[in-house]
Image (cartoon, rainbow, N blue to C red):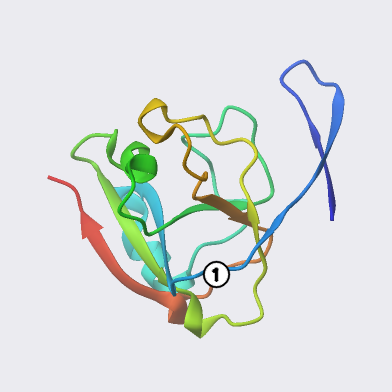
Amino acid sequence: MKYTFKGLDGTTNEETLVEVILTKSLLLHATPRDRSQNILKEGLLIGMPTTKSIIPQEAIFLTEVSDSPCTNDLFRYYNDWCVIVVDTSKIPNHKFYRDFFAQPNMDNIGKENKHVMCFENIPAKAIKKIAELN
């Protein structure tokens, strides 16, 4: 699948997306805590304001659960953030693609990028848990 987006300078770019076959049924999504109650009611929605992305995209960004350091950036924020746990078994027809925007994690050299993106809303029924960071 080809994905077209505008860069910081306004130029149009295109990437070939790599579909990811998930090996585990959980994905993680970091978000400001003040959004958590709304996410519990409505799910994760395309077009919600972004806080981590420099270039707004019509996508939802998540991270595969992993024991490798590639999930470190989920926890680089402060006490006003939480982690949304998504149960992908509740959304079996959603497709996930490798997040080519993800910054390389220097602790993760030689290991696969575990960041993914999808282009469909994630309904509230797929939100398994919200973990608040303290």
Residue 22's place in the image compared with 71, above or below, is below
Residue 120's place in the image compared with 76, above or below, is below
> Which residue lies at the image location 52% right of the left edge and 30% below the top edge?
103
Residue tagged 1? 122
As drawn, the residue found furthest toward the front would be: 110
Q: Secondary structure at mark 1?
A: loop
> Which residue lies at the image location 64% right of the left edge and 52% below the top edge?
59
Q: Position of residue 91 (x, y in %)?
A: 56, 80
Position of 82 with respect to 117 (left or right) is: left
Residue 111's place in the image compared with 25, above or below, is above
Res 7 quadrant in image: top right
Res 19 quadrant in image: bottom right
Pick the quarter of the image with the N terminus: bottom right
Name the residue nearer the viewer: 57 or 102.
Answer: 102
Pick the quarter of the image with the C terminus: top left
Name the residue nearer the viewer: 27 or 79.
Answer: 27
Amino acid type at mark 1: Ile
Q: Position of residue 81 (x, y in %)?
A: 27, 44
Q: Position of residue 13 (x, y in %)?
A: 84, 30
Name the residue nearer the viewer: 7 or 95.
Answer: 95
Res 120 quadrant in image: bottom right
Residue 123's place in the image compared with 56, above or below, is below
As drawn, the residue found furthest toward the left would be: 134
Q: Position of residue 55 (x, y in %)?
A: 64, 30
Badge 1 density bin: few <14, some 14–19, many ≥20, Cα 10 Å: many
